[in-house]
Amino acid sequence: MGNDRSLLMVRGLIGGVLAGLGLCLSGPWWMVPALALLWSIVRSPLAASLWAGVAVAISHRWLIALHPLTWLGVPAPLSLPLAMGVWLACVLAAALLVAAWSCLARWLPGRCGMRQALVLSLVWGLSETLLARWPLFWIGVGGSALPGDRWLAGLAGWFGAGGLATIQLLLGWWLWQLWSVARSEPGQRWRLLRWGVLALVVVHGLGVVALIGSVDRRTDHSEASLPVALWQTAIPTREKFSDRRQAELPERLRQVMDSAQSGGAELLIAPEGTLPLKFPFAEDRGIPLISGGFRFVGGQQRSSLLLLASSRQGTSSSIDKHRLVPLGEWMPSWPALAGLSAVGGLQPGEPSRFWRWGGPPAAVAICYEISNGSALAAAVADGAQWILAAANLDPYPLLLQRQFLALAQLRSLETARPLLSVANTGPTALIADRGVVEAQLPAMRPGLLPVQLDPQQGRTLYVLWRDWPLWVLLLVAVVSLWIRPRPGSGLRPARIRLRKTPPPVQG
């Protein structure tokens, strides 16, 4: 028995490593084998929690780049422990969540057959969509398909990220079934293999269909193309509020606006947090500017995107950030935590991500609001014709930029909208309305990216229904599971290794 428990932990460790790589490098060829190993330990909460903890430890290791925090006033000896603490808190949260999912698997009737696997996969997929609305930055299984498998990711236009997570969980269950049956019943291996390969062909074929024709374009009257310039400022966050950087910013902005205007741009977009409060604007700015900045509403400071249409009007439109970074932007009202926010503490804005700014209506994601596909789909349903993702991912490494860009592609696929990503150090890119990155600036360097924005109308099935089909399917699967359970269905139990030593002699 001790050997069996050790084997479960080994599977959890290996599966967690593969899952972490899948969340970093992307592609079902990492994630599906990792999920197969998770299914093999699904009834062991301890092993399942190890799987999740290792996966998040690898995929979210960029959190350690928060160190050093001395520029926020954190004492040097506490900086690294605090950054490690944030990272370990995310690891622990993932471990507890997957352990709870494993406990649910033990509670369900049966032996993790097809219906049990469907229920558990849907619970996982829908949980990811719910977690994407919480304060923590959630990078789940649903987004791991991009950019590695765009055909499979095409199904996001029908089922969203929750559906992609459900499909990958079921593919992992099939792979575990295949391995289990091959050990115990070799005669059934080829039948199961044929069904699995057929399922792979079908889901990828449906993904292609979704990519080609997932949008209802009966009311599609696209707006004229809009020439836009995206400004990648590449100002280190740790230096942004220094006197030198603040003194240089007005002249840099003037030069960038002149360059954008001479290149034919009719709009300049700058990243999250570019402009400080009470920024001194030039009398003649030329073209309109959309920039991340700050403003006060009812005595409360907010992080916002600001439209500056003319020097006389000042800020003519804005949308506030709703989902704030714990500690970095929002913090409890505890005196000991007052110094951890670089911007003095913020308050969230309205939850709607729909913005009428004077041009084609936009769906806005500021920083890791990009992980909440449901909110952006709701904005598209309200009439948004493109998505604007503004962020500041410094001081984090390129790993986070790749994950952010994959989520941006997923949001484009879900809504069939072009997406402009503009970030301090990257990714600054144009993503077409089918999730293809058409133009991108090199990371970590300042630059100006001219793009043509082609606003789109029409609605994908995900915009129309969002996650409701998954909830209905979960209800049907649960009812089927409890009304007509089939004792003994599903996976055969793994063969128990015989003891190689005789049991101790009983006195």
Image: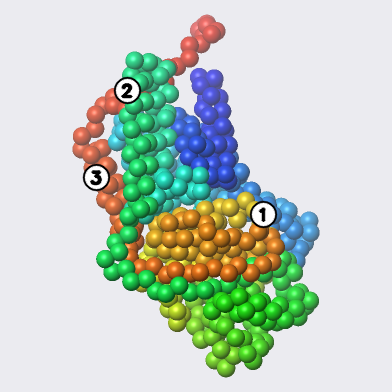
Image location (x, y in percent) of residue 424: 64, 66
Visible residue check, residue 463: yes
Tell me how far mark 3 sits from mark 2, CA to CA.
27 Å
Extreme residue in the front direction: 263
Mark earlier in primary sequence (3, 1): 1
Which residue is label 2 attached to?
191
- As helix, strand or loop, the secondary structure at mark 3 comes to helix
At label 1, counting other C-alpha atoms closer than 10 Å, the crowd grade (few under 14, some 14-19, many 20 or more) is: some
In the image, residue 58 sits, relative to residue 296, either above or below, namely above
Q: Which secondary structure lies at badge 1?
A: loop
User: Which residue: 51% across, 21% down?
Assistant: 4
Report the residue marked by disc 1. 397
Rendered position, 99 above or below 441 = above
Give the residue pinned by disc 3: 476
In what element is the residue under mark 2? helix
- Of circles 2 and 1, the one toward us is 2
Mark 3 surroundings within 10 Å by alpha-carbon count, few (fewer than 14), some (14 through 19), many (20 or more):
few
Residue 371, percent across and down? Answer: 49, 58
Which residue is located at x 41 percent, y 45 percent?
Answer: 152
The residue lying toward the viewer, choosing from 367 and 251, is 251
Q: Could you tell me how far apart the alpha carbons at marks 3 and 1 are, in whole angstroms?
A: 43 Å
Mark whose residue sits in front, 3 or 1:
1
Whole-percent x and y of residue 372?
Answer: 45, 60
x 39%, y 60%: residue: 416
Is the residue 409 above or below the residue 199 in the image? below
